[in-house]
Amino acid sequence: MSTALDTDTTTDAAASEDLETVRLVNGLSCDLPASSPLAKLLKSQRTWVGPDAKARLRILNAAKSVAIVGASPKPQRSSFFVGTYLQQSSDYRLYFVNPMEKEILGQPAYASLKDLPEVPDIVVVFRRGSDIPQVIDEVVAAGAKTVWVQLGIWNQDAAYYGEEQGLTVVMDRCIKVEHARFHGGLHLLGFDTGQITARKTVR
């Protein structure tokens, strides 16, 4: 038979359970028991929304310099492909950050963002999702204002954290694809741009 003592104990246990702040799609947040099915479901879903297409275009057009963190000299790596494209198809001052390399794509490789000769306008990140919070700290320390996490890399908590630090955050999008499609060059990937124009590609 249940007693008042049993009820009080149960209530105290529930009250002492760790609460987790979960963000909703509408931007609101609520505290739920971390072990609850709803908290787990909401945490597994993507609720963070980054800059829309127009905002991403403004970011790319305003930038003069781009640093690639996690750049690789290996042609099979995505960062090499992206670096090659940006070298050949943009006017950005391009910097490669990899403490294990001395040179990438004919340019010097830097050990960290703080070693660059200037503060980059965009920091493109090719690192594991779990590494993104640390990279965000490095971006903030270097004074950069935009962090662009590449396609296939997702860390929602890090995205919110970056915004809390005053950064503009783009995540799970390829800067090469975005730049190419905005500037009429997506055909370089073999895709139809959907544009019919006689205008020369803007670089």
Image (cartoon, rainbow, N blue to C red):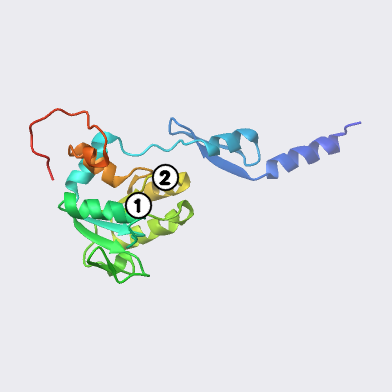
Quarter holding residue 137: bottom left
Label 2 amino acid?
Answer: Gly
Decide which of tag 2 and tag 1 comes sooner along the chain.
1
Q: Position of residue 91 (x, y in %)?
A: 15, 52
Q: Nearer the viewer, residue 126 or 27?
A: 126
Q: Which of label 2 and label 1 is nearer to you? A: 1
Numbered badge on residue 78 = 1
Residue farthest to the right, as pictured:
1
Residue depicted at x 45% and y 31%:
25
Q: Position of residue 123 (x, y in %)?
A: 30, 55
Q: Is residue 121 visible?
A: no
Numbered badge on residue 152 = 2
Q: Position of residue 190 (x, y in %)?
A: 26, 38
Distance from Cα at disc 2 to Cα at disc 1: 11 Å
Q: Nearer the viewer, residue 108 or 13?
A: 108
Query: Secondary structure beneath disc 2?
Result: loop
Quarter holding residue 110: bottom left
Q: Position of residue 94 (x, y in %)?
A: 22, 59
Task: Assess disc 1: are there few (<14), some (14-19) or many (≥20) residues with their C-alpha within 10 Å of its C-alpha.
Answer: some
Above or below, comparing residue 65 to residue 43 in the picture: below
Residue depicted at x 21% and y 37%:
182
Residue farthest to the bottom, as pictured:
102
Query: Secondary structure beneath disc 1?
Result: helix
**Residue 44 shown left or right of residue 8 in the figure:** left
Label 1 amino acid?
Answer: Ser
Residue depicted at x 38% and y 56%:
136
Above or below, comparing residue 73 to residue 158 in the picture: below
Q: Nearer the viewer, residue 29 or 92?
A: 92
Q: Is residue 11 visible?
A: yes
Residue depicted at x 41% and y 46%:
159
